[in-house]
Amino acid sequence: MSQIPKRLLWLCLLGPLLACASAPVPKPEASEKSPPDFFGAKEPKSRLMMLGTFHFEDAGLDEYKPQHRLDVLSPERQREVEALVEALAKFQPTRITVEVNVPQQDKLDAQYQDYVAGRAGLTANEVDQVGFRLAKKLGHPKVYAIDSAPHQVLDQLYYAVDEKQVATLDPKWQARFTQLYTHDDELKTRQSLIDHLRYVNSPERIRQGHGAYSIAHFKVDGEDGYLGVDLRTAWYNRNLRIFRNLQRLMSAPEERVLLIIGAGHLPILQFVAETSPEYELVDVRDYLRAQ
């Protein structure tokens, strides 16, 4: 049997490949297409920017108790606070909201007016250092309280937890989260304020932080098998209430609202804001330039 010429052999081998390469790409099925724009993606929307923070002056209310103090009132840190305020001012917020319970709005108003009038200085708290400073710089008449306690029915679940059952849970993941918190606690003393807040507000750190709510007390069963789950519901309820308070301030498309809040709130609040058709979520890191 005679041999096939090499040129013809190569054509035989490449033919199917060339045919595949030139074949038209199949169009996606109708189910794969993006849905029509029912929600007005290009319509003007209120803009919401969230600054997640550590507590400059920790009140000891969180499970992790900071071991490293950051003296935000020192001259060096005060310069960093001023740089942070300057950076946030570029967003030009129309309203500044802070982690203070709504029923304390009158007290917050009085504190802010005393500061603006020169009758009182600023505490180390981030509400004062960032919220009050920025509001005064921009000429705002007030700073808005948006925090809320969870519904009292959910809050009462803490009293039903059997600590003996908690002691039997695998401590591995809790220990690892403690390592993360300890790392962050020490890191804040080595980074500039803006650099540390860029880290705190990074998507990966926000994602990691949310994982803490599916371990430890979440696995406490109680009588019906879901006590820990219901207990964690209180945290979601609090954040959904906070978002409702924000909604009341974003009724017009020209509103640009800045939220200053503990970073642990970000996973839930950002998810709700990102999926809402009414608002545009702005990434605060666009304004926090690395230093």
Image: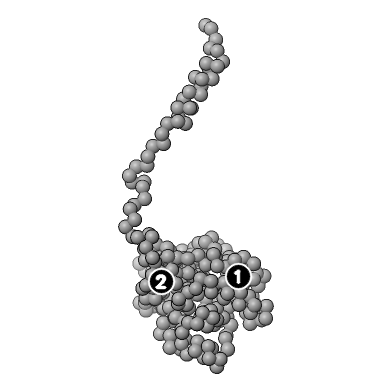
Q: Position of residue 183 (x, y in %)?
A: 62, 67
Q: Residue at x 53, y 12 (%)?
A: 4
Q: Is residue 86 above or below residue 282?
A: below
Q: Is residue 139 above or below residue 203?
A: below
Q: Amino acid at mark 2?
A: Glu
Q: Which residue is mark 1?
A: 194
* Mark 2 Cα-neighbour bin, 10 Å: few <14, some 14–19, many ≥20: few
Q: Amino acid at mark 1?
A: Ile
Q: Residue at x 55, y 93 (%)?
A: 119
* Mark 1 Cα-neighbour bin, 10 Å: few <14, some 14–19, many ≥20: many
Q: Which residue is mark 2?
A: 254
Q: Secondary structure at mark 1?
A: helix
Q: Specify which label sits upstream in the sequence, 1 or 2.
A: 1
Q: Quadrant of residue 19?
A: top left
Give left or right: position of 160 versus 135: left
Q: Is residue 151 above or below residue 10?
A: below
Whole-angstrom CA distance, mark 1 to mark 2, is 27 Å
Q: Quadrant of residue 20?
A: top left
Q: Position of residue 161 (x, y in %)?
A: 43, 73
